[in-house]
Image: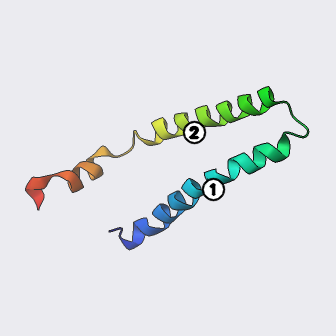
Amino acid sequence: MAGPDDLAGLTGVYTLAHARFLLPTVLATLSACLPYSVMRAAVAVVALVCLVLVMVGGRGDRGAAAEFSDPART
């Protein structure tokens, strides 16, 4: 289970994971004033930005993750 220091971060990830369900509603609303190709390009750009952020953020402290997954430490 998450410790007190990690709980807020995990709650934020949980919230963002469920916020993605709003995307179809937002796209349906915007379809009245934007063409489909523009909306699709915007979603692709946002997805690429997210990918870059995840890749850059994934280069952090890998030692901490290995510390929890080492069965010899239990």
* Amino acid at circle 1: Ala
* Residues packed near mark 1 inside 10 Å, few (<14), some (14 to 19) or many (20 plus): few
- Tell me which residue sits at (41%, 68%) in the image: 5
Q: Measured from the top left, where is residue 48 in percent x and y?
A: 59, 31
Q: Nearer the viewer, mark 2 or mark 1?
A: 1
Pointer 2 or 1: first along the chain: 1
State how far apart marks 2 and 1 are (Cα).
Answer: 14 Å
Quarter assignment of residue 28: top right
**Label of residue 19 in the image:** 1
Q: Which corner quadrant holds the C terminus?
A: bottom left
Which residue position is annotated with label 2? Answer: 50
From the viewer's perspective, tell me whether residue 5 is left or right of residue 72: right
Q: Measured from the top left, where is residue 22 in percent x and y?
A: 69, 53
From the viewer's perspective, tell me whether residue 24 is left or right of residue 2: right
Quarter assignment of residue 35: top right
- Tell me which residue sits at (67%, 31%) in the image: 45
Q: Measured from the top left, where is residue 36 in percent x and y?
A: 80, 30
Label 1 element class = helix
Quarter assignment of residue 3: bottom left
* Residues packed near mark 2 inside 10 Å, few (<14), some (14 to 19) or many (20 plus): few
